Structure formats: structure tokens, C-alpha cells
Amino acid sequence: MTDMDSISKKLIEDAQGVRRKNIKEAEEKASQILAEAGKKAKEIIDRGKTEAGGYYKETYTMEIFKVKAALDQKLLLKKLELIEGIIDRAKKRLSKLDRDGWEKFLKKTAHELGISAGTYIIGKDEETVDDKLASIIKGIKPDGTAPDFKKGLKILGGRAEILLSPGNYLDMDIEDLKMEIASYLFSGDKE
């Protein structure tokens, strides 16, 4: 039975060798599969982090932009309010112009507009301008008709009709004035 024992022993040893070899191959295969799975998992995680980081940056940038745009809009509205407030205060000041102020205004405006002839009408509620003050504009005479306006001095000449009052004068140049004030407020430059 020694032969039989030897054959049995040999079969058992061969079977154990095959078993060890199969276990080793299975362990190597499992190790390889785990390594590939780990590599793919790392790639997926890295890609996810990159995408999340990009989304975060995009969202963060968009939120910053929204907040900045809202603040810029509020600042713009405040600056526009300032412009309107400055113009309103200027109109109020001009509406209370005294006799000396009116005289300077009439001389300057008549010179700028080249008024040298025509007639004039004083507004029905005008408190400062009278015939004597109107006469500083050389070449104009009283019209004699009833005024159809409240304040200021209307000069008629040919087909032209000019209503002179500091408020109206300001209104004529209001857009230029707004641009100058806006330029100062928005850029800080004084010109």
C-alpha cells in the first residue's frame, strides 16, 4: 500500500498545489480588481471635486456679481437723487433771486442771446422785475398786452418769443447741467 499511499499523497499534494495556485491567482485578481476599482473611484471623486469646485466658483462669482450689481444700482439711484436734489435747490435759489441778481441775469442772458430789439411783458405774479429793471436790456420796450404767464420776463421780437427767468434758463440747460453734475459725481473730476 505504499504505492497507493504514495499516489494518494501525490494527489493530495498536487491538489493542494493547485488550490494554493488558485488561491494566489484569486488573491492577485482580487487585488487587481480592487486596485482598478480604487483608481476608478479616485477618478470619479477627483472629477466630482473638480466639477463641484467649478460649480462653486461659478455660483460664488454669480452671487458676487448680483450683490455688486445691486449695490451699484443703489449707488446710481442715490447719485441720480443727488443730481435732482442739486437741481431742485438751484431752482429754488434762482426763484428767490434779488434785484441785483436779476440785473446780472438779464444782462448776461440778453448778451448771450443777442437780444437788441423787441418788446417785453412782465409776468403777472413777478415781484422783482419791473419796467426799470427790464429797461437794462437796450432796445426793448413794453408790449402793453396782459401777461399770460406768472413769473419772469417775456421778450417778443419778430417771430421769436423768449421767456426769461432764472428757472427757465436753468431748464434750457438742464441736460448739460445734469451731465456736468453726473460727471463730477461718477468720476470725481471737477471741470
Image (tube, rainbow, N blue to C red):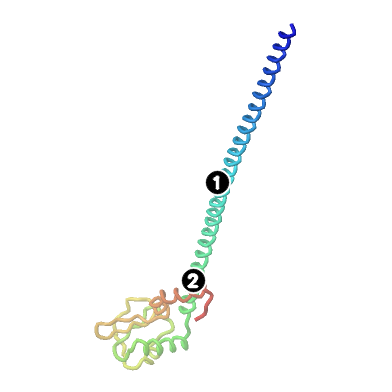
What is the x, y in percent for residue 115? 33, 89
Label pair 1/2, CB-CB below 8 angstroms: no
In this rendering, the answer to whether 9 lies above or below 74 is: above
Which part of the image, by quadrant, shows the N terminus?
Answer: top right
Q: Quadrant of residue 167?
A: bottom left
Looking at the rendered structure, the kind of residue marked 2 is Ile
Q: Secondary structure at mark 2?
A: helix
Q: Residue at x 68, y 18 (%)?
A: 14
Q: Residue at x 64, y 32 (%)?
A: 31
Of circles 1 and 2, the one toward us is 1
In this rendering, the answer to whether 162 lies above or below 8 is: below
- Work out whether residue 135 or residue 75 is closer to the camera in this orientation and state it: 75
Give the label on residue 51, or none.
1
For the residues labelled 1 and 2, the Cα–Cα distance comes to 47 Å
Q: Residue at x 55, y 53 (%)?
A: 63
What residue occupies the far top of the structure in this picture? 1
What is the x, y in percent for residue 110? 36, 88
Please name the residue that numbered disc 2 is placed on. Answer: 83
